[in-house]
Image (spheres, rainbow, N blue to C red):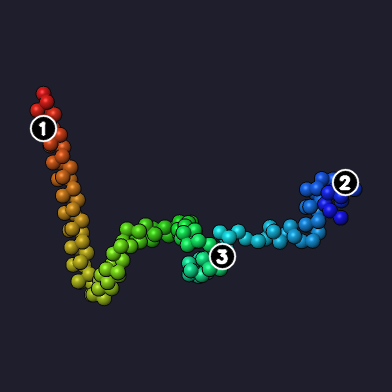
Amino acid sequence: MSYRKIANLVRISVRDISIIINDFTGEGRKLMSEKSVRSKAFQMIKDKKSLVDVLIELDLPASEVENMYADYLKLDHREIITLYYNEIKDCFPDFLKYYKIVKDINDHQRNKIRSIIDNDYIISKQERRQHEQDLENERSLKFKIKF
């Protein structure tokens, strides 16, 4: 019998008949326990599957898998990795080369490199301040000339 005929016979809604039959056959539980594609992707990423494996197994476009991975990192409080990677991705091979060099040197040399980097940061910050001051001085001169 169709759900409609059963509903007319026992005088309840087709929706209720559907729920009762699904509960009886176990279909309702099966649907509830099946994970979404997004949940499956997150579980695979958590299980350290490669993004290519996620793409193949779940038959998803690469951009969607990349977005899911970025969301996973954000939810796992590791999104800073993505931010840093996006900053250095164009020079990533050079970055790795420099990282290996720094990693292999002794502490004294590493401290020298840190000092150079710190000094460079301080100098660039001072140059930025000087540039802002120069712009402010130019604005002040233009304002004085008008009056």
Q: Name the residue under label 3.
A: 58
Image position, residue 48 (x, y; %)? 49, 70
**Residue visible at 56% across and 68% down in the picture:** 57
**Residue visible at 51% across and 66% down in the picture:** 55
Looking at the image, is mark 2 or mark 3 earlier in the sequence?
2
Q: Name the residue under label 2.
A: 8
Looking at the image, is mark 1 or mark 3 earlier in the sequence?
3
Q: Which of marks 2 and 1 is in front?
A: 2
For the residue marked with disc 1, what is the amino acid? Leu
The quarter of the rendered structure image containing the N terminus is: bottom right
* Gap in angstroms between the C-alphas marked 1 and 3: 65 Å
Image position, residue 9 (x, y; %)? 90, 48
Foreground of the two, 4 or 93: 4
Q: Name the residue under label 1.
A: 141
* Gap in angstroms between the C-alphas marked 2 and 3: 42 Å
Secondary structure under the numbered disc 2 in the rendered image: helix
| Within-10-Å neighbours for mark 1: few <14, some 14–19, many 20+ | few
Looking at the image, is mark 2 or mark 1 earlier in the sequence?
2
Occupied quadrant, residue 102: bottom left
For the residue marked with disc 2, what is the amino acid? Asn
Foreground of the two, 37 or 111: 37
Occupied quadrant, residue 22: bottom right
Q: For this view, does 139 lie left or right of residue 76?
A: left
For the residue marked with disc 3, what is the amino acid? Leu
